[in-house]
Amino acid sequence: MPKIGLRNIKTALAILVTLLFYLLIHVINPEIASLWYSPFFAGIAAAYSLQSDYTASFRQARIRSMGSVIGGIYGVFIVNMYEMVLHNPIETSLINSLNLLSFYLLVGIAVIPLIYSTVLMKQTMATFVTVLTYLSITVSIRNNLPIEYFAVNRIFSTIFGVIVALLINGIHFNHIKNKEILFVTGLDGTLFIDNQELSGYSKHKLNHLIRHGANITVATTRTPSTLFQALNGVSFTLPLIIMKGAALYDMKNQEYLETKPIMKEDRTILEAYFEKEKKSAFAYSVMDDVLTVFNGPIKSLAERYYYEQHKKDFYKNHITGLPNK
């Protein structure tokens, strides 16, 4: 069986707080408790807003609060407009089927401008909550309570539940952290998928882990020229292993901490091989923390394509000719 998650426990705790708050108010003053606060709406708001992480909780809390305010105010407007036209309170008017039909027609049609208002305000994520609050104001039985009081009750209860959820989700329990482990991840085919860049979720999780002390670095064949754009937004604290382990690079300070040059004997063998095959080599060299690519005369379409693709890359220079021996 799956274990009970922390979000599950925090949600239950948030709902319990909203219920106990009502009990506290009721003990002090029952009239105020029934007039200004609803544990039902506060509990729903708390459960809705408490997400897997604080950022998501804050986003949902904002949506819930904004939707409640918009829907609540609009609901008060619709009810007051209806009562002014008929000169009869809704609680009494609902006894008459004809009045009930006219009121429901108004409530239903009024949803159109309500939803459209969320589009105009670019708050479409709050549409569901806005309509939910609007219906709770207009259709719910309010036991002769003035509509303004009824709306404030719903809005205040929702905002209180949202605040409780944010406070409880902000509680961090201490975990045993082993900071002696080094996590090394690849990029292409690992963190990068088809679009050759990090997803927003991956950036968020990497930053979250690094911020809480995880030792994370990257091992890649890439050079800084492509890494800066691909890893933009990730605050690595450890140097990156780049160019298949040929160098350690500090992203923050933009400097090479260590390089592993090709041995002279191996270089001689490689140059002889390229000469024999009548091909040009692209030799990478780090000078004064600047990556420089040397290449001989272009001898094939593939070499030309590679050169044209990379000659304008950032954080490296291309020079025709081989480096001094």
Image (cartoon, rainbow, N blue to C red):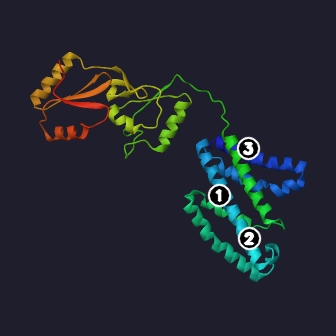
Quadrant placement of the C terminus: top left
Tag 1: amino acid: Gly
Mark 3 or 1: in front is 1
Number of the label disc, if any, that sits on residue 13: 3
Q: How far apart are marks 1 and 2 (CA)?
A: 18 Å
- The image quarter containing residue 30 is bottom right
Task: Name the residue tied to disc 2.
Answer: 79
- The image quarter containing residue 70 is bottom right
| Left or right for 8, reference 279 | right
Task: Name the residue tied to disc 1.
Answer: 67
Q: In this view, does 35 lie above or below 286?
A: below
Badge 3 element: helix
Tag 3: amino acid: Leu
Q: Residues within 10 Å of mark 3 (few under 14, many from 20)?
A: some
Quadrant placement of the N terminus: top right
Q: For the view shown, which residue lies furthest in the front direction?
A: 84
| Left or right for 249, reference 71 | left
